[in-house]
Image: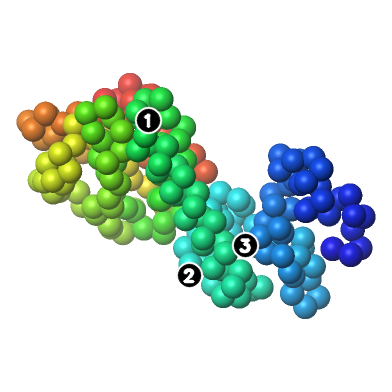
Amino acid sequence: MKDIPTALRPREKLLSQGPAALADAELLALLLRTGMKGLGVLQLAEKVLVSAGGLAGLLQASPETLGRIKGLGPAKRSELIAVMELARRSLQTDLQTQPVFGNPQTVKEFLQIQLGNREHEVFGVLFLDAQHRLIAFEELFRGTLSQTSVYPREVVKQALAHNAGAVILAHNHPSGVLEPSRADELLTQTLKSSLNLVDVRVLDHIVVGRSACVSFAERGLL
C-alpha cells in the first residue's frame, strides 16, 4: 500500500468518497488487510477474486474452496466466512420481516448465496407464513452433478411441520445452463398439486445459477 498515493489507498478512498467508489478488489483488500510475500494486498485481493470466480463466486464459496486459495490463511478465511454469513443473515432478515412479493430480487440473491456455487444439485424450499414472510429455508434433497430425486411427501411433511401457508421451491443447475428442463416443469406441477391438497400455495420455483436465476412465475410456468 505504501507505493499507492494516500488519497487512492482503499481506506482513505472509502472514507473520502464512500464505499461505492471502490472496486471489488479494493473492498476485499480492506478485509484482507495484508498481502503475502511478493504480493501486495491489492494484488492478493485481485488473485482471490479471479480464483473464486469474481465477487459472486466469493460470496458463495465454501470454506473448503477458500482453503484452496493460496494466500488465505485461517485468519483471513475466518473473516471472509464471517462477512458472508452476515450477508446471508441480512438477506434472511429482510425476507422474515417483509412479504417476499416485495423483495423478489432479495429472494434471488439469498438463493444464489445458498445454492449458486454448489458442485452438485440441491433442492431447497423457502417456507412462508400466511403473509408470505420467510419462516425457514431448508435444503431437502441433494443429488448428483445433473439431477436429484425429490419426494413430494417429504416436501408436504415439512410444509405442515412449519405450518406454512406458501412455499418457494428452488434448485441449482451446477452445469450453468439455467433453462428449466421438462422434468423441472413436471416436478413443479406435481409439487403444486400435492401441496394444494393441504392448502399450501407454490408461489414460485427458482432455478439458481452461479450468476443468475430463472423464475418460473416470471416465465408464466406456474
The residue under label 1 is: 98
Q: CA distance from mark 3 to mark 2?
A: 13 Å
Q: Position of residue 222 (x, y in %)?
A: 26, 25
Label 3 or label 2, whichever lies nearer to me, is 2
| Rendered residue at 49%/52% (across/down) | 86
In this rendering, position of residue 83 left or right of residue 196: right
Is 63 drawn above or below residue 111 in the view shown? below
Q: Position of residue 185 (x, y in %)?
A: 26, 34
Q: Amino acid at mark 3?
A: Ser
Q: Earlier in the sequence, mark 1 or mark 2?
A: 2
In this rendering, position of residue 179 left or right of residue 1: left
Q: Earlier in the sequence, mark 1 or mark 3?
A: 3
| Rendered residue at 73%/69% (across/down) | 34
Residue closest to the far top: 220
Q: Mark 3 touching mark 2, by CB under 8 A?
A: no
Which is more toward the observer, 17 or 141?
A: 17
- Secondary structure category for the residue under label 1: loop
Query: How busy is the neighbourhood of tag 2: few (under 14 within 10 Å), some, or many (20 plus)?
Result: few
The residue under label 3 is: 51
Label 1 or label 3, whichever lies nearer to me, is 1
The residue under label 2 is: 64
